[in-house]
Amino acid sequence: MNKFLTMLMVLLLLAPATVMAATVDELQQQLDELSQRLDKAERHVATDRISWYGDLRNNAHSLHYKDVTFSPGIQVDYQDFGGKMATWGATIGAAGDTAAFDNDPTTIAVTALGRAFENFNIMAGNFSPTQAAIMGQGMANAGAGIPISPLMLAPSTRTYDIDNQILYTTRLRLGMKAKISDNMTFAGRLGMFKNWGDSTGTKVFDSWNAFTMDGTNGGNTTGDFLRVERAFFNWKHIADTNFYLSIGRRPSTYGSPSNFRENEKRGGTPTGHLVHFNFDGLTLGYKLSEVTGIEGQAIRFCYGQGFESEWGNGEMFNNETANLKDTHLGGFNIDLFDDGATLAQLTLFRAQDVVDGFKGVFAFPIEYAALFAPTLYADMQKFPTFNFNTRYTPSSVIGDINLVGLNIAHTTDSEVTVFASAAMTQLLPSGKAGMFGGLGTDAVFEARLSADGSEIYMEPVRAENSDTQEGYGLYVGLQVPAPMGKFGVEYNYGSKYWSPFTQAQDDALGSKLATRGHVGEAYYVVELNRNAFIKLSGLYYDYEYTGSGSPVGKPKKIEDVQNGKEFSLMPVVASAWDANVSFTFKF
Amino acid sequence: MKLMKVLIVLMLVVFASTAVLAAEGGNSRKGKYLYKKNCKTCHVAGSEGGELTPLSKTQKQWDRFFNEDKHKKSPDALKKFSEKDLKDINQFLFDHAVDSDQPETCG
């Protein structure tokens, strides 16, 4: 009995040990398995060095343009024109009397002269009374010692409405982040932005938005290609200080307060009211908050290049365009206060040696051939829907631009956001001009004889004036929580010479913040979940002056262009509205 | 100018109704204040609790921390907070977690 009890007790004592041994073995197995899985994850993390994220937005727009007017013209030095006609005429005899000069090369000039006057007379017969009066006044002005007056290029002013009932776009953005070292990181973003059914990469040049170029590719539909919208490194705490350095393609779009309507956080460093443009450059920043104790306070010196004057411009030919100056942008971007709820931001920038446009590509409009290139037009008119792609290179340094702005945005505890931004742009023209003008001023054209003497053509030779011009912009908005999401209203105004760098803002009607006039917007964001939302939006543009989105050329009252008193080389829109719905998915 | 008037009226109407339309869930901004005032006293570099920032965890990890872990190492640390306070802190840490949307600025 004792033996039995002893054995039983031994068994009872051993049992837990046996069970325990099994449990330890099982745990060890589980640990080994977990270790193996963790090894795989660790290997994956170590080799997959870039962390990806992104968003996809599909948008349907209904676009309506009211009272579009195409009334092209140029400013001409009539005294120079008259003088040249007289000189050329005197050299070869009486105009039209060409028979005696058949063997003289300059006789061809007579043909050109005759053709020019013939064309002019045909056109003049179709001028409206207002246009004819302007032409007559130009001649009279020249006689009275006022050399420069408009020359209308189209026989009559055309005004029409355009209704694009539906336009679909898709925007894909792929963000990248990587850690280089403890105080160095990389960030980038690839982007595709296209309208449905088009991947040509160019548009027919009917506005500055139809210009495929470096600074605005991120915000303009181009096609099914991924472009590098951003790529830069951040090097923080340099030498254990509060300085940081960042170089590369800048995060210079979707800045505050333009991010609220996008339903996303601050999307770029500079204020979106003044700068919404893809720049290549650098930022040297200093975290002032570490010194002052004021939350989020930072001062940044920013520098970028908007135009390279030699490389790629055919500099080996040493021609005129290859000898321009580079365009540089520099200034200060100061976060006065930023605690996540309130942002006060001061921006001071200067664009130095601005040229008459940027390098870019577009499809050449047949309308320009008809106006400026009769020889080209003779063939192009046989192929009215064929537009050759061409690369535009600026031709003149037209001046400098100063930009200054103050932006204040605040979000309350109940998630109500209010913001107000006021800004000024100052144009400092150099007196030079390209085809579309100088800074805030028109180009003055003079007559030239083509190399073979067969044609008289008009060439921009200088700006009409070099007066400093200032423009002002105001941008206010309110966003509030609403059932299932958010509701917002925004308003912005730009004065006659308002010329910010916001052309990469991806509004279908063109950057609303660049508008010289009034824009109102209302939107409703329906949040499906944290990463998906539907946005219903309506925008109304009321343009007051021409040239929204470009500092080149003299702004003119829309009414004056409509009634033929003034001209514009681009079609001019009086008002427009865009009703759109978008589906955005973040991942 | 008619457009401006309509917008201003619209802004006022919407602004007046904001109290009714306030968002549900924790208040991130209050959470930030509570986090800085309370949590950062222990969770700084070199401290006993070790440095901890919103970026230290993912959104799901922060949710698990508040729903399951509940500061297991030192449960008393959370006891002084009300349910609402904890929700606010959770919301702040969730909103600024390593996998949350971040401002896309440089520096």
Image: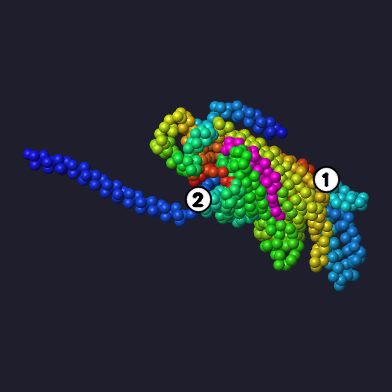
Label of residue A52 in the image:
2
Residue A378 among those drawn in magenta: no
Distance in Å between CA atoms under marks 2 and 1: 60 Å
User: Magenta segment range?
Assistant: A327-349
Identify the residue position indicated by label 1 in the image.
Answer: A130
In the image, A540 versus A434, the foreground residue is A434
- In the drawing, does residue A360 fall left or right of residue A11? right
- In the drawing, does residue A68 fall left or right of residue A199? right
Q: Mark 2, residues whose alpha carbon is within 10 Å: few (<14), some, or many (≥20)? A: some
Q: Secondary structure at mark 2?
A: strand
User: Residue A360 at what x, y percent from top left?
Assistant: 67, 56
Is there any visible trace of residue A125 in the rendered image?
no
- In the drawing, does residue A140 fall left or right of residue A160? right
Residue A329 among those drawn in magenta: yes
- Look at 66% across and 57% down and name the residue there: A361
Image quadrant in which you'd find residue B2: top right
User: Residue A370 at what x, y percent from top left?
Assistant: 74, 57
- Look at 49% across and 51% down and name the residue there: A51
Query: In terms of secondary structure, what is the magenta stretch mainly?
Result: strand
**Circles 2 and 1: CB distance less than 8 Å?**
no
Q: Nearer the viewer, mark 2 or mark 1?
A: 2
